[in-house]
Image (cartoon, rainbow, N blue to C red):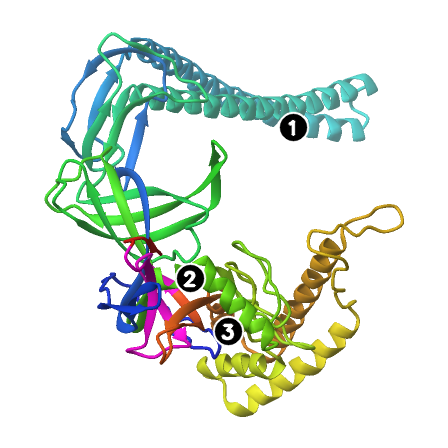
Amino acid sequence: MDKKVLVGIAGAAIVAIGAVALVMSGGANTATGKYTYETVTVGKGDVARVISASGAVQPREKVDVGSEVSGKITAIYVDFNDRVKKDQVLAQVDPETFQNTLDQNLARLRQSEASVDNSRAAIDRAKVALDVAQKNFTRQKALFDQQAISQQAWELAEQTHTNAKLTLQSEEVSLKSALAGLETARATVSDSRTRLERTKVRSPIDGAILGRDVEVGQTIQSSQSIKSLFVVAADLSQIEIEAAVVESDIGGIDAGDPVVFTVDAFPGERFQGAVVQVRQLGTEAANVVTYTVVVNARNPNGKLLPGMTANVEITADRVTDTLRLASDATRFQPPKEIMDAMRAEAERNGQGGQGQGGPGGQGGPGGAPGGGGAQTVGFGEGGQRPQGGGQGGGPGGERRGPGGQQAQIGEMLKSTGIDEARVAKIMGEMQSEIQRAMASVPAPQQPQGGAGAIVGGPAFGPPQSMLQQQAMQERRAKMQQTQEAVFRRNLNEQEYAAVAKAMSEMQSQKRVTVYKLDAKGELERAQLTIGLSDGSNAQVIRGAKEGDAFVVRATAAGKGESKP
């Protein structure tokens, strides 16, 4: 699944998905002074980020089959690799106890049915008695009205009539109780039949037997945790791999990314697949956090067997026919004496300041960053300097002001399909709101004292450099919150998703310091913005054109020593 390309000024990466092809540009050797320099040229080709991981081959659908009843296994009808159909009997649990229970419950059911019949007959007798009592009551009442019988005879007839009605009501209640007992007996019989049927362990799906963990004569105990007796795989022509990817590589992996994998059983064969799921819950083991990436693949000839270890290569990002440069050029550092001379010359010309060396260091005031840092996309008062590593800021550095950053974000918005009028409106709102937001956040103070000095407060508080870093982080967070608020207010859901993706890609870019040879054959510093890298080549976003040559190695003349 190819990914959209979103190009931003000052560093928007071109990102897509596919296979990787690495082609090194031709090099050249140039002798100058005490050193001979080897160069490579910027060319066009493909660059991809390929992530390696491993996982076990498993059927895409498999079921652990257990028994819902306890007892002794009296028969097993299947073995490993056997093909089975849905509802086919795999094993038999001793049914004797369950058959006896069913017979007992059937007898109780017949008792309940007899009780119901008896209650109905009692109701019929009660109705006859009531009818007789009713007639006698009517007759005695007429005689009593004529004063032909005594008061006692009338009261006896009335009592007999009332007792007959109560007897009928009592028999009707008894019938309801008998009916309830009958329903209970029927349910008990049904449960007994079900449990008897469950002594037959059946396959829930069509498939093949992958595992069998039971033998004839073995007693199994059914509980809340049902023991797995068989493992049935639905279809071995479709397999999946749950690859464990370390947290540093999980970014950029999406459903649909192409996958190539190998297994040790067939070392010369590469199988194709695709990512179908990236699970969000990480797993920590030995202080290493990994995330599960589920890969689906076809296995039409059945070569891939469950349990095989798959060595997976996931192509997370890929760009084709893009400018690229050998990664050695981005890692090259001039010999110390040449670097010192370049720094001294820059200081004499008033260019740049002293930065802090090492990976992740920040260039000094006005200095350009070294290789290895990620840019912060934003704009405000005075702009933000990119951060990077390598030898300090030094000559040739640049500081991006608000104009360049506004243009970068504006071009990024246009690349997502937003018209110029809306872009102008969004950028106007963003500029005014960021200026108000920055006014409410204290500006970072430059550290006082020499290098490495610790400047504390009255009670020896945090170093001034730490306070400066915290202030810069606060301003950057405030700026990002303001940008997001403006985007959400002015963009619909689809546009916001595209812009968020573009911003994420811009964050993945970095600026690096490279070196080329000037007309005199001397080293000259240059700045490149690079995007995707596969370790051998890096995508060039800006700062160079096809055919430009950059130094990858310096060899001392006559000594055969080289400095990468």
Mark number displayed over residue 134: 1
Q: From the viewer's perspective, is the residue at label 1 or at label 3 nearer?
A: 3
Give the alpha-carbon distance from disc 1 to disc 3, as whole Å. 92 Å
Secondary structure under tag 3 reads helix
Q: Residue at x 13, y 28 (%)?
A: 82
Over which residues does the magenta segment extend?
Answer: 532-558
Give the alpha-carbon distance from disc 2 to disc 3, as whole Å. 39 Å
Residue 375 position (above or below residue 492): above
Q: Identify residue for label 2.
A: 334
- View extreme (bottom): residue: 421
Three-letter amino acid code of the residue under disc 3: Val
Q: From the viewer's perspective, is the residue at label 2 or at label 3 nearer?
A: 2
Tell me the crowding category of disc 1: few under 14, some 14 to 19, or many 20 or more residues within 10 angstroms, Cα based: some
Three-letter amino acid code of the residue under disc 2: Pro
Q: Nearer the viewer, residue 68 or 478?
A: 478
Q: From the viewer's perspective, is the residue at label 1 or at label 2 nearer?
A: 2
Residue 21 position (above or below residue 97): below
- View extreme (left): residue: 301
Residue 239: image quadrant is top left
